[in-house]
Amino acid sequence: MIKPLAPHQLYTVCSLEQFDFDTTETLDDLNAVIGQDRAIQALHLGVNIQHDGYNLFVLGPTGVGKHTVVREYLEKQSRIREMPPDWVYVNNFDKPSEPIAISLTHEHATIFRNDMHQLVEDLCSAIPSAFETDEYHLRLQEIDDDLKKTIESAFSALNDEADANNMRLLRTPHGFAFAPVKNNEVIKPKEFDALPKEEQQQIEDTINVLEEKLTAILRMQPQWQREARNKIKELNRQIVMFASGHLIDDLKIKYQNHKVILTYLEAVQQDVIHNLQNFRLEDDTADHMHVPLMKMPAFRRYDVNILVDHTQHDGGVPVVFLDLPNYANLIGAAEYTVHMGALQTDFTLIKPGAMHRANGGYLIIDAMKLLMQPYAWEGLKRALFSRQIKIQSLGQIYSLVSTVSLEPEPIPLNIKVVLIGERMLYYLLHAYDPEFRQLFKIAADFDDRLHRTAENQQMYARMIAGLLRRDKLRPFDRSAVARIIEHAARLAGDAEKLSISVMDIADLLREADYYASISSRATVNKDNVQRAIDAQIYRGDRLRDQLQEAINRSILMIDTDGAEIGQINGLAVMQLGDVSFAVPSRITATARLGSGKVIDIERETKLGGAIHSKGVFILSSFLAERYAKDYPLSLSASLVFEQSYGRIEGDSASMAELCSLLSALSGLPIRQGMAMTGSVNQRGEAQAIGGVNEKIEGYFDICRFRGLTGKQGVLIPASNIRHLMLRADVIEACANGQFAVYAYNNHDEAISVLTGESPELINARVEARLRELEKIRQNLAKNIKEPVNGNGKNAD
């Protein structure tokens, strides 16, 4: 029979002798990232390879420091790269709905905007002054005089002709009219009627000719006025060109190497000429003295909307983390203002997205948050595929609204996108989104555990020292560091591994520091760490206490002494939040004559999961292979988790189910002081299970409440020995012989411990019972009654 495990096998101690420091204060910070060589190598490749599609997806469990490591790595890389250009939007005077994008080198965006503001201020001063000069008024008067002279000359010539024909041009309330004259006096109507018909006709013909010439003059008058206005416009243009030319020429010289700005300045000059009235409305300007000049509607068209400005950066490329990755925050948007009940927008209301700010650098996004925002994922992919940022409203893209919107010129995109998320999310995207594989070719997989070697424990101590300095905590002594390392092994669920969940370790450090502070200690010791661990468990184990109370009050039926046939204590683990604890369950088995079927009541009632059902099928297969190779099983067995009202999943109780069934077949009782966990394969071998520490401790707590007898213990698969990191009180009880942990390799070793009998005897009795059932089945089939045992009982 196998022996209980020795106390040193139940817990792997972190030796203090390996540490050459008294407190973490003397330790250097860990420069490298511990245990993440694979992920760092992937980050290095993804960041430095400059080809399309080599964006990164950083995957791993929560708490291993993915965000921190990625951000620190990218910020380090960003310093060695050249700063990307700034971007601005300016007005498109020809098509205001299509603003023009301009790229400028570092700091020049602000300079360019200031230059445009200064230009408008100078124009507002220079143009009105130019129109107040004597030269301008003189030339204006000349144009006016020329117009008057032309009109007067035409009328003078007409008057002379009228006089030559004894006619006079008269101005009446209804317009101009010609009248015949005689002796320098206008002929009255009666006198005209008295004239001979031939003379009357001659006068009328003369009047008709003169009226045609008058009509021609009147028709020419608007043209002469138009020509005068054109001359005035040309004069005004010349004046504006004179007033603004040198101002704009200065800017053209300053930006002579930037073709887009030169073209823009030409358009500005022409727009100023076409809208010079805006610069001459002194009264209107006075009314807006309290409003900044570029905020006035007349001058906002000349403003510069700085979309991306790197003046606040010390150098290198930007590293942007987007916390709320909705479509507008990611791609950018054109906002609207309400004016007299209508929505209005212009280029000054274009707002940048995170892709604009990160352009030329790195953009970090939480993958789950991104996928939860409508259209954000599609918007990101569209930008990466097209390699440009095109600001469009969702209503415009999907034709949801008819409001006129802007279509700003797209901005070229050069960016590395880093998505951070859980492994399952990565695998789902990889499987179901074909475009994902084209855009995110690099997966940086963060591990949550590392090997517990002497070298890694030294590095772990330096990691702890770095976390303490980061959070400005008290130094930890050697014993405290050793206890944290031991707890890290417990978190990893493996005595040969260490958890590198930085979040969990950092939380423990802060809480241990708190308990040291209330104890007025300058350094944190092992007791402070243990107190913090105990407090974490206590905060989350309310439900565990209630379940254990129900067991201790016999509401949930769990025996911890005596012996019963076909009954065993199984162990399951429940995870609630950050706390895991064991839930013992009574497993019972019955066996009777039947057709070879083992009934899993949990599966029949649809309370058993697929893995649990698989374990029962394996159990049935092993039973037939081991005990009934040469004849069919004439067995009908039932297995059930008593007082279980929820779903049962997993195969960690399959060995316990097998042992309870063997007990029912052999008639040998199982010691109820023992609990068991472990999975079985078709050869009867024990397979490792999870949560072994929680299962042992959970059953130990129940036994301790009822009183430790020395006959209580837990059976675990031998392959789980390396996972043991049990509580100190469990180890002490095992050392004192009050409790025991057994490690078994197969069902023979397990059933031997449970029954106290040899495997040979147990197997013989099981086989004898199965043969007996088969013989009964054969007799029933022949309808023959015969004695089947020595007491004279018949098969029927």
Image: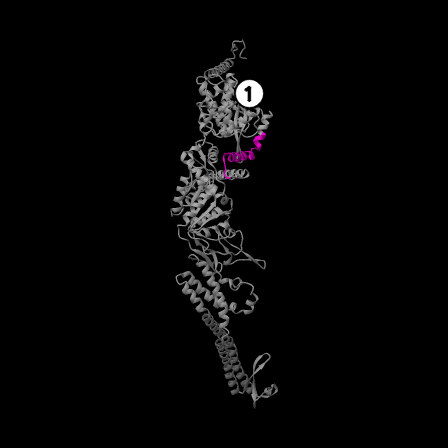
- Please tell me whether residue 573 is drawn above or below residue 521 in the rendered image: above
Residue 538 belongs to the span the image colors magenta: yes
The type of colouring in the image is: one colour
Dot 1 falls on a residue whose secondary structure is loop
- Specify whether residue 616 is in view: no
Query: The residue under label 1 is which amino acid type?
Result: Asp
At label 1, counting other C-alpha atoms closer than 10 Å, the crowd grade (few under 14, some 14-19, many 20 or more) is some
- Please tell me whether residue 675 is drawn above or below residue 536 in the rendered image: above
Count of labels in the image: 1
Q: Main secondary structure of the magenta part?
A: helix
Query: Mark 1 — residue?
Result: 561
Q: Which residues are magenta?
A: 522-546
- Specify whether residue 271 is in view: yes
Quarter of the figure that contains the C terminus: top right
Q: Position of residue 659 (x, y in %)?
A: 49, 21
Residue extending farthest bottom: 183
Camera-nearest residue between 64 and 264: 64
Q: Quadrant of residue 204?
A: bottom right
Camera-nearest residue between 766 and 198: 766
Camera-nearest residue between 212 and 599: 599
**Image-based side of 627 in relation to 540, left or right:** left
Residue at left offset 53%, top offset 83% = 205
Q: Position of residue 385 (x, y in %)?
A: 43, 48
Residue extending farthest right: 190
Q: Position of residue 460 (x, y in %)?
A: 44, 37
Residue 370 belongs to the span the image colors magenta: no
Camera-nearest residue between 728 and 478: 478
Residue at left offset 40%, top offset 45% = 46
Q: Position of residue 399 (x, y in %)?
A: 51, 52
